[in-house]
Amino acid sequence: MTFELRDYQKEAVDGLYNYWAGKAGDNPLIVAPTGSGKTAIIAQIIMDAMSFPGTRVLVVTHVKELLEQGANGLLKLYPEADFGMYSAGLKQKVLDRPITFAGIQSVWERAYDIVPAPDLVLIDEAHLLPKNSETRYNRFITDLKVCNPLVKVVGLTATPYRLDTGYLHKGEGAIFDGIAHDIPVAMLMEQGYLSPVISKGGVKQIDLTGVGKRGGEFIESQLATAASDPELVAATVKEIIDVGADRKSWLVFSSGVNHANMLADEFEDHGIDVGVVTGSDSGAVREKTIADFKSGKLRCLINVNVLTTGFDHPEVDLVALIRATASTGLYVQMVGRGTRIADGKENCLILDYGQNVERHGFIDQVKPKDKMSGGDGEAPAKQCEKCQTMVHAACQICPECGFEFPAPTLNHSSSSYRGAMLSSQVQSEWVDVDSVSYRRHRKEGKPDSIRVTYSYGFFEEVSEWLCPDHGGYAAGRYQARKALLGATANTTGDALDEVRFWKKPSRVKVKPSSHNPKYKEIVQFDYTQVEKKHEAKTQGGYADLSDLEDIPF
């Protein structure tokens, strides 16, 4: 029996084989966004492998639900599949079939018991693999390579990076050696395979001023304290109810157990049927709560670090991020819970109360750092008002004099994110320039440049950087602008001496930056109005601006 892959799924499979054929490496990644149909891709790879007699394939992941989904999906697409399951959680321990679905917690010490050794290992949710050689995944793969030095390892994930170590295929200790294929999120949404995501303006944001970081991520206890401000809880719940009135299935990511319970109490006070799932719940309790949510018995489901991967409920049409994360992968996974398509679902509304979109960018253009920034990111110190001893910012009582620090004042007055979620939703606009300022910009390890700031509207501004001394593309951009500016200088120093004589654009076209939607970037300049006004003055009249042309950047 055969099944028909979608075009992009076929390209992903072909990309894997081309990667191997080109000898780029043995252990690549396939980047497949949530809802893109990883099961079909895995099934096709397994079917192709089974066409070679004696081949053994091992599919490994970390949760029993994913094992069941994978096995059931394979059976549906490939009924002839001869497979077994090895998972203590599923109470099955079969290792003698050509195809094996295994939980890493159960199989990691059994590599030498899989006879003959696997030829191909497929790892679902591969972003969960750290680079530490002592982890279960790493030790298991190391043992498998002893049993079969030719074994190939393929990772599948929607997010090929980790907060602690950056991209999965880069750096020391990386299991994977490249990306064989990357399926674009924007393309899937444009073609109707994924639900578009949109955003609406919100009332408040979590005040992260006093929230420090540890290991690159926000400190959970401090984040929970900031998010649990009663005023903020009440405001966010009210907004979710108001803007979600025409939406059926609300999924909420909270900042801690107590915060989740506060949110649940507030929803219940408004008559909303709500459930909470946490990592401390028993399996039975969690499964019952999730089942009630999927059946529609519960309209809202609040979770605490539980439903970020492996949760499949296409009907989710509102996702509220009432938490902040420094992890690009976690951000993408949370938003991804709402991108599956369902009957009657036009899009998914994302409500972001943790500045996550500004921090990580549009969901189709996220660019994580190659590696987490140095240091453990602890919160800053503060000074005791009584004895001037420097203590940790989270300290409640001074250890030297016993002074009790007042409770922090939280400022949630700024509104939650109200911009685009996708780069295709970005709207550019022309703005009239009121004034232009220039100053020398210094950056360690780089030649100086010129920061040009254009002011417009009510205290709005946007900047560009001109780099005559940088060489290459950056210097080329400046040279291309010289004629429009009326500049003659070829160095930063000389340019700063003559900027007062430069022409100023009458307006600029701006849009939210792809790197941080909180800020604007310039996409076009218009100098024609300046030229026409100058011409009109010399003729003693006013210029007709109806034929105004756009001057591209």
Image (tube, rainbow, N blue to C red):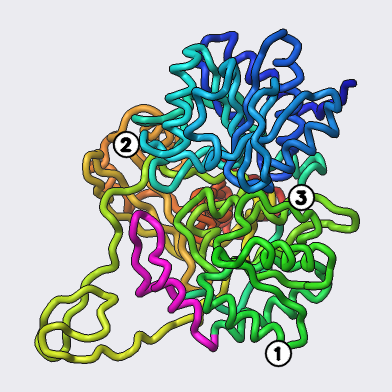
Q: 62 or 201, which is in the foreground? A: 62
x, y percentage for residue 304? 56, 66
Residue depth check, mark 1 versus mark 2: number of the one nearer the observer: 1
What residue is rendered at 42% in x and 31% in y?
139
Q: Judge whether residue 339 is colored magenta.
A: no
**Is 290 left, or right, of 375 in this rendering?**
right
Say which mark, if any, is on residue 160. Answer: none
What residue is rendered at 70% in x and 69% in y?
301
Residue 60 higher or lower than 273, as above or below: above
x, y percentage for residue 133? 36, 34
The amino acid on which the numbered mark 3 sits, given as a three-letter code, is Arg
Q: CA distance from mark 3 to mark 1?
A: 30 Å
Q: Look at mark 3 in the image and give the residue it sits on.
A: 340
Q: Look at mark 2 in the image and give the residue it sits on.
A: 468
Q: 34 or 361, which is in the foreground? A: 34
The amino acid on which the numbered mark 1 sits, given as a three-letter code, is Asp
Determine crowd level at label 2: few under 14, some 14-19, many 20+ residues with C-alpha closer than 10 A.
many
| Label located before the other in sequence (1 or 2) | 1
x, y percentage for residue 406? 29, 91
Q: CA distance from mark 3 to mark 2?
A: 47 Å
Residue 47 higher or lower than 462, as above or below: above
Determine crowd level at label 1: few under 14, some 14-19, many 20+ residues with C-alpha closer than 10 A.
few
**Is 73 left, or right, of 181 in this rendering?**
right
x, y percentage for residue 84? 71, 30
Q: Which residues are magenta?
A: 207-231
| Label located before the other in sequence (3 or 1) | 1
What residue is rendered at 28% in x and 56% in y?
376
Does residue 510 show up? no
Q: Look at mark 1 in the image and give the residue it sits on.
A: 269
What residue is rendered at 61% in x and 86% in y?
234
User: How many numbered tags mark residues here?
Assistant: 3
